[in-house]
Image: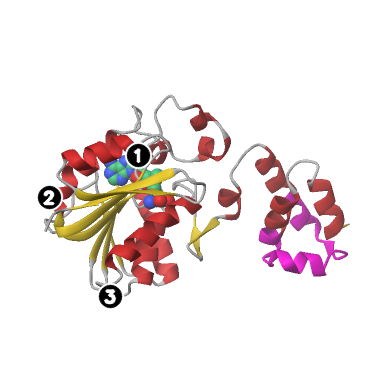
Amino acid sequence: MTAIAALLSQARAQIPASEARLLLSHVLGQPTAWLEAHREEELEPAAAARFGALIERRAAGEPIAYLVGEREFYGRSFLVTPDVLIPRPETELLVELALAKVGAHPTASILDLGTGSGCLAITLALELPAAHVTAVDASPAALEVARKNARQLGAAVDFIESDWFAALPPQRFDLIVANPPYVAAGDPHLTQGDLRFEPKVALTDGADGLTSIRRIIKAAPAWLAAGGWLFLEHGWDQAAAVEECLAAAGFCALERHRDLAGIERVGGGRIPD
Ligand SMILES: C[S@@+](CC[C@H](N)C(=O)[O-])C[C@H]1O[C@@H](n2cnc3c(N)ncnc32)[C@H](O)[C@@H]1O
């Protein structure tokens, strides 16, 4: 048997210390702070072997979130599997904008396009309990994860399998949010880091990165109530193209927002009253 401190120290040869602590706390079902208080405790061989296997997988590049099966988003823990994009901190900007636009109108009807883990739809449903939230995704496997998250977090969301708006019953929303696949097909990031392990359909349109964005913006006015808002997350170099599409589709009050890294990350606009 080996002590926790020794195992963590050995792991540091392969992965950063913070990641080793996360993986060991996952194996033991204990918070990372617990490890500090039990540094000299001996680990059962089976637990040490499970930890060793996770270190190997992490060292080979698998995302931490898939290894531990969860990721925090807007202060809540979401189940994640390789069927869904790992929620990103920059996507919390869409939540903040949505709350700013419809927070004073608590019974708003909201649509989340390409819900993945459900992080946006579920967060909005929990932050605005009187709102009616619908979420769509083309991936049945992603919807399964999103439904589990909604059950686990106690959120009421209508999940629908749909190619963007195609399967939605006719209706008008007060707000639409979308984080569509916006990475261009040849972007080298697709072959680096966590992105190698995430679903391709969540990351790229297989073309110039703007196909989904264009489709959503063009169709959105027919699904928005007068005065309704659309906000989309986009790539670092897509703000101007998104703004152009929004203007061409008849949106007014166009907005551009930067993420915490200072990168233009979200574009949006309103349908005139
Ligand atoms: C970038 S991920 C966003 C996931 C989640 N909303 C988030 O922010 O973490 C894009 C999502 O769009 C979905 N998607 C891709 N093409 C779609 C389509 N044609 N119709 C509906 N959803 C689609 C993918 O399955 C994926 O879950």
Answer yes or no: disc 1 within 8 Å of ligand 1. no
The reply to whether discs 3 and 2 touch (Cβ–Cβ < 8 Å) is: no
Q: Which residue is mark 2?
A: 222
Residue at disc 2, secondary structure: helix
Q: Which residue is mark 1?
A: 239
Tell me where the magenta segment starts and ends, as one range. 25-51
Whether residue 24 appears in this view of the structure is yes
The numbered dot on residue 130 is 3
The prevailing secondary structure element of the residues shown in magenta is: helix
Residue drawn at (27%, 73%) of the image: 106
- Image side of residue 186 versus residue 231, left or right: right
Residue at disc 1, secondary structure: helix
Residue drawn at (46%, 49%) of the image: 259
Sequence-wise, which precedes: disc 3 or disc 1? 3
- Image side of residue 215 versus residue 151, left or right: left
x then y, percent, for residue 105: 24, 72
Give how far apart the Cα atoms at labels 1 and 2 are: 23 Å
Please, what is the three-letter code of the amino acid marked with disc 3? Ala
Residue 238 colored in magenta in the image:
no
Please, what is the three-letter code of the amino acid marked with disc 1? Ala
Of residue 218 and residue 54, the one placed in the foreground of this image is 218
x then y, percent, for residue 88: 49, 50
